Amino acid sequence: MTTKRNSFFRANTVAVFVSVALLAACSGGNEDTAVLEEISGLKVSLSDYRYGVQDVGSRTAQMFRIANVGVDTYPINNIVISGENPEDFLSEFPQGMVLEPGDDLEIDVAFSPLGGGQRTASLDIDYETIIGVGSNRVESLYYSAHEYEEAGDYVTASSMYREYLNSGATTGNKARAMIKLPLLEEADIYGAGSDFGLYKSALDKRDDGDTYASLQLLDVLLRQHGDSYLVDDAKYMRAYIQMVDHAEYQLAYDNLQSLQDEHPDSSYIDTAMYSQGLAQHELGNTAKAEEIFISLKDRHTGVKLGLFELQWPKDNYVSRLWFDKSEEQLDELQEETENTDEDPTA
């Protein structure tokens, strides 16, 4: 496998054409392995994947995940399959993708052999590198924090995650840091026992794109550590994955309700209510979503003048945050309803 670099530069952008994956499989013979190459800040998943031996005319698919784990930005110009037998490997590639730090792209590549023997091809990515400037420089703080976390230095990791969040982070890593920071801070208080290890592993599995493994680890934590300080964290994360990653809105809604019923003092109550409203919206239950957002807004209302239908939030940051977020969702729901009334066919 070779790496080809174009011999021109433009501003801070370097155009590169790289063969990042060797797709190998067999039809009616010995099976072979897919060998993947990691390039700079782009990480390709599945370093040792076997398509196996397939019959001619059959079809089997595998998902490849390309993640930006660096501080630069990667516009993806094109993704093609080339090499010895490109016609045996099928996929539809998205166009015009830009991977910011922390972003990832999932691609399904199917093997459907047209002839016998070993069949090989390359998954080629035509991409550009935009050298990290401005806000992208902030991403180095995230990766440094992650390194300290992996080394078990949770105090330093917490400090760096907080510095990262306070430095204007805007990429997909921001959500990861926001989840990791409270976990590491709690570990400093309660210790890093087996319950902590399970929860951290679940978060890491989700970051790697293996959401089902993440759910399994969360379930193990809930079964084995029912009295852990991380129980409400695990329940919320389980519902979050069901909703955001799997689009299982009703299941997520039910589990969020269970979280509120069983842990009324949890710090996730506001987030759970807000997520329930979003879930009901996705399910098409506009009236129920509106009811939830009104309840969340009322929960953080400090002054209410019924005569003029005026409300103000309580005088603290958290209440102002959830008051405003609820009001924003209510405005959007109202706008959607008005548009639907104007156009009944919408």
Image (tube, rainbow, N blue to C red):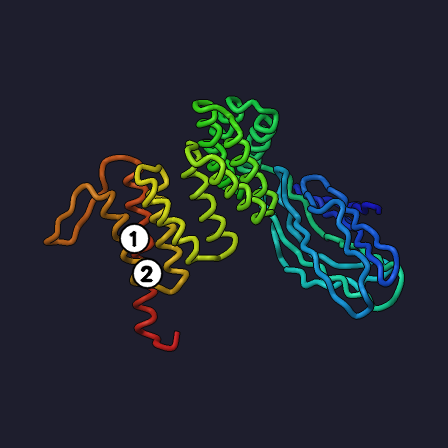
Callout 2: SS? helix
Callout 1: SS? helix
**N-terminal-most mark, 2 or 1:** 1
Outermost residue to the front: 224
Q: Residue at x 47, y 37 (%)?
A: 179
Q: Residue at x 33, y 54 (%)?
A: 329
For label 1, the crowd category at 10 Å Cα-Cα, with few meaning under 14, some 14 to 19 and many 20 or more, is many
Residue 128 horizontal side relative to residue 202, left or right: right
* Relative image position of residue 313 (x, y in whole percent): 23, 42
Give yes or no for contact between labels 2 and 1 (Cβ–Cβ under 8 Å): yes
Q: Residue at x 39, y 54 (%)?
A: 253
In this figure, which residue is indicated by the disc labeled 2? 333
* Relative image position of residue 294 (x, y in whole percent): 26, 53
**What numbered label is drawn on residue 293?**
1
Outermost residue to the left: 307
Residue 17 in sight: no
* Quadrant in which the C terminus appears: bottom left
Which image quadrant is residue 79 in? bottom right
**What numbered label is drawn on residue 231?**
none
For label 2, the crowd category at 10 Å Cα-Cα, with few meaning under 14, some 14 to 19 and many 20 or more, is some
Q: Amino acid at mark 1?
A: Phe
Q: From the viewer's perspective, is the residue at label 2 or at label 1 nearer? A: 1
Which image quadrant is residue 61 in? bottom right
Residue 42 horizontal side relative to residue 120, left or right: left
* Relative image position of residue 323 (x, y in whole percent): 28, 45
C-alpha separation, residue under disc 2 versus residue under disc 1: 10 Å
Foreground: 228 or 22? 228
Outermost residue to the bottom: 345
